[in-house]
Amino acid sequence: MGEHQHHEGHGSHTDHVQPSHLTHKTQGVSSLACMVVTCSDSRTPDSDTSGKLICHLLKRQGHTIAAYRVIKDEPTDIRGLLLQATSQEALQVVIINGGTGISRRDSTFEAVDGFLEKKLDGFGEIFRYLSYQDIGSPAILSRATAGIHGKLVIFSIPGSQEAVRLAMEQLILPEIGHIAGELTK
């Protein structure tokens, strides 16, 4: 019988095999050095509630904030910051919030997407699906994305607090240790 088939009529099943997705998670990295970036033409470090929320949620799970920046939604600034992040040996994760919409000023997606060497398409797909369950059809306007550049895991998410909480709690925090662990193999 296969690993996932139910065994009826038998006594206790002591040779239970843990599903492979759970085994992978237990082999992940438990504390990561993270950079949090807010892309906004209007927010400042004092008014950046979404960036502060990301930092709080990361710290609460045992991760460290190696850097925190608020920058303008300018592709050259974003790309320059990402290049700088790749040169920091200890840095493992970059989480960018803001600039993922479709307005003329929203250019974070283009800067991040062009920087990624390996894309995690499922992140954006699942984020939009979960957003759709909360807000309906406006979820299609989000261009949330994620991927890998060298040894860095990079996430780019919308800047609203609701979107940040959704992305962090349901997708990023449950998986960043696993993803970072895969990059060390």
Image: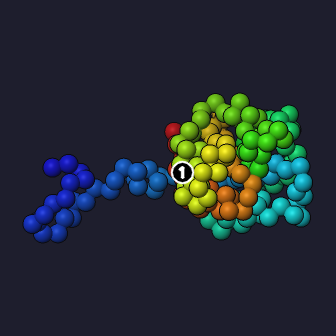
Picture coordinates of residue 27, whole percent (x, y): 47, 52
In the image, what residue occupies the spot 64% across and 51% down?
A: 138
Q: Is residue 1 visible?
A: yes
Against 30, residue 126 (above or below) is: above
In the image, what residue occupies the spot 40% across and 51% down?
A: 21
Against 92, residue 30 (above or below) is: below
82 vs 150, nearest the viewer: 82
In the image, what residue occupies the spot 15% across and 60% down?
A: 7
Q: Which residue is mark 1?
A: 129
Q: Is residue 82 left or right of residue 173?
A: right
Against 12, residue 114 (above or below) is: above
Picture coordinates of residue 180, whole percent (x, y): 58, 46
Q: Is residue 36 left or right of residue 141?
A: right
Picture coordinates of residue 127, whole percent (x, y): 58, 50
Label 1, secondary structure: give it. helix
Q: How many marks?
A: 1
Picture coordinates of residue 56, whole percent (x, y): 72, 66
In the image, what residue occupies the spot 72% across and 38% down?
A: 109
